[in-house]
Image (tube, rainbow, N blue to C red):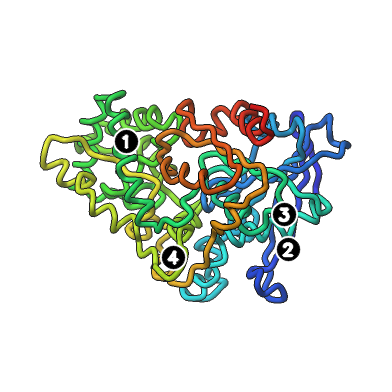
Amino acid sequence: MTATYRQPGVVLTDRHFTVPLDHDCPAGESIELYAREVVASEKARQELPWLVYLQGGPGFGANRFVGKPAWLGRALKEYRVLLLDQRGTGHSTPANRQTLPLRGGPAEQADYLAHFRADAIVRDCEAIRPLVTGGAPWTVLGQSFGGFCAVTYLSSAPEGLATALITGGLPSLDAHADDVYRAAFPRIERKVAAHYARYPQDVERARRIADHLLTHDVTLPNGYRLTVEAFQSLGIILGGGEGSHRLHHLLEQAFVRTPLGAALSDAFQEDVQGLLSYASHPLYALVHEPVYGQGERPTAWSAERVRAEFPQFDAAKALAGDGPLLFTGESVHPWMFDCDPALRPLRETAELLAARTDWPSLYDPARLAANQVPVAAAVYHDDMYVDTGHALQTARAVQGLRTWVTDEFEHDGVRAGGPRVLDRLLALARDEV
């Protein structure tokens, strides 16, 4: 059923599509996709080119905007926009602890989730594009993991693209997950150092919380087991423009006095469980490392293994001395499937995905080197989530790709500075600057 409705300044239409689970077996099982069409109210009856937005992640549905904030208002000046819930997210056949048992046991679930990477997402886009545009190519805007998908799009179906716009999402074309995390941990350490330089009082606060967690068993109200490693993983928010300030506000409310002594406050626990739980986006944890898989080498819990190469992240060692506790972020670890009630039933499925050795290639270097699609990418200087060195190496490998390297924004620049970021990318892609 198609529903059309209004919000301030926009007309929205719910769109539903059926696509193969495995595009190599089009007569086999199918899944349902959902997308929200958005057009400016004053342009609702006009013929406009299309822009499809691919959300960051993996594992997040498209933004649920109200009206036309951030980059959307700029896009709606000249496009109809399709906000696609990528397969397994939002309303697009969601994959989680409640639905995955319908597939069978862990082995069946892992085989199913092997079809939820960028290559399948691109083929979904190509399957629905004729139904949306009548066959005309469209512009893709890919944020973070959505940018990874855009590079896969350029590799496998460039004929479907009029323009590709990428924000904070140029992947390495050939790096194994180990290479990704060896580059990531030093960046995270720099972000933590910058946070402590801004808020030096947080050094002692973080150490005190970590010490409490090393000596107490803490279970959050939603059943999440808050270990010191889980606490450290709150550093994931340091990659956003307001992340350092958010972390500071969180730490300053950590403890309250009770009749039994100091305890972690209800307010702190409530905020922490909201940041740590994967209940709303479990696919992020399940396929976060598999999105880097190419070839026969397994990802094998890469971030956990590589972290051991950086002993400065060990909380117990930090507390034994007088150094600061280091936060982590943008990584998934096996202990998360023990701590998080939303992930516990999926632990064996995650183990099977980590051991998988038959990942198809996601990128075609030869095709990218001969690219004819206008491409522009925002590369954020010292981006915590996507390595700048990897991004620029890929930019050089894609013919005609133009970059805007900036330290004005963090990884969420398309949200924080949306209209300006999109303006700049469109101008670059159109060779206007």
Front position among marks 3 and 2: 3
- Amino acid, disc 2: Thr
Q: Residue furthest left?
A: 321
Marks 1/4: CA distance? 30 Å
Q: Is residue 339 visible?
A: no
| Residue 159, numbered circle | 3
* Earlier-in-chain disc, 3 versus 2: 2
In the displayed structure image, the side of residue 266 where residue 165 appears, left or right: right
- Amino acid, disc 3: Glu
- Amino acid, disc 4: Leu
Q: Quadrant of the N terminus?
A: bottom right
- Amino acid, disc 1: Ser
Q: Residue at x 54, y 46 (%)?
A: 56
* Residue 268, position as x, y percentages in the image: 35, 36
Q: Is disc 1 surrounded by few (<14), some (14 to 19) or many (20+) residues within 10 Å?
A: some
Q: Is disc 4 surrounded by few (<14), some (14 to 19) or many (20+) residues within 10 Å?
A: many
Marks 4/2: CA distance? 26 Å
> Which residue was labeled with disc 2?
18
Front position among marks 2 and 1: 2
> Which residue was labeled with disc 1?
265
Secondary element at tag 4: helix
Front position among marks 1 and 4: 4
Q: Nearer the viewer, residue 410 or 201?
A: 410
Q: Nearer the viewer, residue 369 or 1?
A: 369
* Residue 280, position as x, y percentages in the image: 52, 50
* Earlier-in-chain disc, 3 versus 4: 3
Q: Is 118 drawn above or below residue 239 in the view shown?
A: below
* C-beta proximity under 8 Å, tags 3 and 1: no
Q: Quadrant of the C terminus?
A: top right
